[in-house]
Structures are given as structure tokens and as C-alpha cells.
Image (cartoon, rainbow, N blue to C red):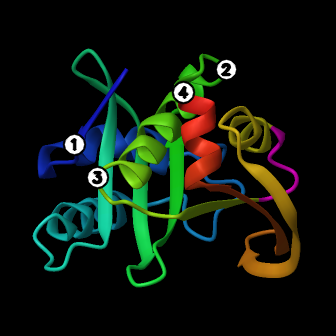
Amino acid sequence: MTLSRIVTEDWAAVHTWAGLAEACRYQPWGPNTPDETREFVAGAVAAWSDSPQRRFPYAARLGQEVVGMGELRVRSAPQRQGEISYIVHPRVWGRGIGTEIGRLLLAHAFGDQRLHRVHATCDPRNLGSARVLAKLGMTLEGRLRHTRLIRDGWRDSLVFSVLEDEWSGVQG
């Protein structure tokens, strides 16, 4: 599995999961229409031209096939804080792809971006995502109540984080 910059032509592959209720069950977006997916991918592609760049969206590829996405956002450059997020096509769930996306995003965050702290959130019902974040060496900090309004009502968020010295210990 590799991460590479998302490109405009990836929109159709992204739509194969962005249009699925199963894939976006715990998200405030989706299922997307084709136009919504095109607009999302266009914004992700444009983020690579921002200066200073604070958003790093990647396509996750198995060979040439796009099977997911990962994104690093620099939330505060002066405080060296960032956030990661990822999504994987349901047909490849359980293969370690989400964990590998997260590992590569954290390596970029603590390497090239020199961040000090990176966090991620997930819906408490999303047990697979919580397992991924724990496998990445992230610490569960707590539960924030009613942080997102999604299709089935208000969603809580579990907050996980990892610090640069913890990450270097995991990677060393």
C-alpha cells in the first residue's frame, strides 16, 4: 500500500466508497452524489497548492487501485499540532490498510512537518477505527459528547493522540 497525492482523475475511485452508506455511516457527510465527490476531490487537489500548505490529502493505493484516503491537517503550526483522518473502501476492511495509512501520515507529521502532537477522532461505535488508532500507538484521551450531527442523531467523539517522543519510541 502506498500514499500519493490525490489527483483529479481519482474522483471516480473515491466515489466507489463515498457513495456508500456503509462507508460514511459515522461521518457528517455522505453518501455523496457524484458531483459532491468531484467537488471534494477538487478541493483536496487544490490543497496541494495552498501556501502555506496546511492540508495534505493522499490517495491510498494498492498497485494502481485507489482503495482509500488519508489526510494530515496542520491545525496549528506555531503549536506544532496536527490531526489525521482516513477512510478505507469497505471491500478491503480488515486488511491493515487503515493502520498503514495512519502510520504513513504520522511519519509525515513527525518527520517532514515536525509536529509535536497529532490527534484523531472517531465515533465510539466505530470499533474498527478505534482499534486502528490504538495500533498506531495513540492514547485514548477521552470522549467528547455530541460533537457531530450525523444522519442518526448526535455523535460523540473519542479523541486519541500521540506525541513526537512517543512516536519516535514506537518507530525506533
Q: Which residue is mark 3?
A: 112
**Foreground of the two, 53 or 40:** 53
Q: Residues within 10 Å of mark 2 (few under 14, many from 20)?
A: few
User: Could you say which disc has been placed on residue 85 in the image?
Assistant: none
Left or right placement of residue 75 versus residue 42 in this view? right
- Image position, residue 40 (x, y; %): 32, 65
Tell me the SS state at disc 3.
Answer: loop
Q: Amino acid at mark 1?
A: Asp
Give the residue type that dot 2 points to.
Answer: Gly
- Label 3 neighbourhood size at 10 Å, few (<14), some (14-19), many (20+)? few
130 or 76, which lies in front?
76
Spot occupied by residue 74 in the image (x, y as percentages of width and height): 40, 71
Residue for point 30% across, 59% down? 56
Magenta range is 123-127
Q: Quadrant of residue 150?
A: bottom right
Residue labelled with disc 4: 172
Query: Circle 1 sits on which residue?
Result: 10
Which mark is nearer the camera, 3 or 1? 3
* Residue 159 painted magenta: no
Which three-letter amino acid code belongs to the residue tagged 4? Gly
Q: Quadrant of the C terminus?
A: top right
Disc 3 residue type (three-letter): Asp
